[in-house]
Image: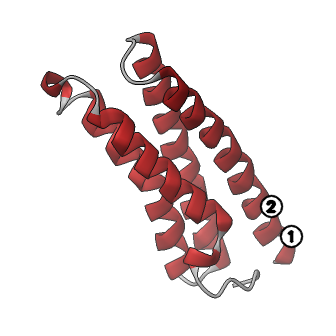
Amino acid sequence: MGVDIKSYRDLLVWQQAMDLAVLCYKLSKKFPKEDLFGLTSQMRRSSASVAANIAEGHGRESSQTFIQYLRISQGSLKETETHVILAGRLELGNKLELKDALASCDEIGKMLRSLIRAIQDKK
């Protein structure tokens, strides 16, 4: 791979994506129980997918494939962001936690774009 990354766990973007997933799980825990298979499930799945795709892409040991998975991670991040916005519009969850989740989405998005550029520039 063009960029020397020993483990995906060393990547700050992966660490922050894991933090976002934990935040989304905690946030959605407070959603109404009747929503368990709706927004709750979707938010949890998409937020966990951000970090999972970073890890999977790194494990493929090819720069081009890693970039492809980072882009999939970007899609999962946008999906998570949309679920967080919807939760806010539905007045579900804590407003401060929702705001923190959106800020985290913005920061992770910037980090993913930077990592993609760094890998592309090393090729």
Residue 72 visible here: no
Residue kind at label 1, given as amino acid type = Asp
Structural crowding at the residue carrying mark 1, measured as other residues with C-alpha within 10 Å and reported as few (<14), some (14–19) or many (≥20): few
Q: Secondary structure at mark 1?
A: helix
Where does the image place residue 40, in percent across and percent down from the top left?
28, 33
Quick check: 105 left or right of 25?
Answer: right
The residue lying at 23 percent from left, 28 percent from top is: 38
The residue that label 1 is drawn on is 121
The residue that label 2 is drawn on is 117
Residue 84 visible here: yes
Quick check: 64 left or right of 30?
Answer: right
| Residue farthest toward the left in the current orientation of the protein | 34
The residue lying at 50 percent from left, 71 percent from top is: 55
Residue kind at label 2, given as amino acid type = Arg
Where does the image place residue 57, in percent across and percent down from the top left?
53, 71
The residue lying at 58 percent from left, 71 percent from top is: 65
Where does the image place residue 71, in percent across and percent down from the top left?
60, 54
Mark 2 and mark 1: span between their CA atoms? Answer: 6 Å
Q: Secondary structure at mark 2?
A: helix
Where does the image place residue 17, in percent across and percent down from the top left?
54, 55
Whether residues under marks 2 and 1 lie with C-beta atoms below 8 angstroms apart, the answer is yes
Which of the pair 89/65 is nearer the observer?
Answer: 89
Please state, as top left, top right, bottom left or bottom right, where the N terminus lies in the image. bottom right
- Tell me which corner region of the image, top left, top right, bottom left or bottom right, holds residue 102: top right
Quick check: 44 left or right of 99?
Answer: left
Q: Is residue 26 above or below residue 120?
A: above
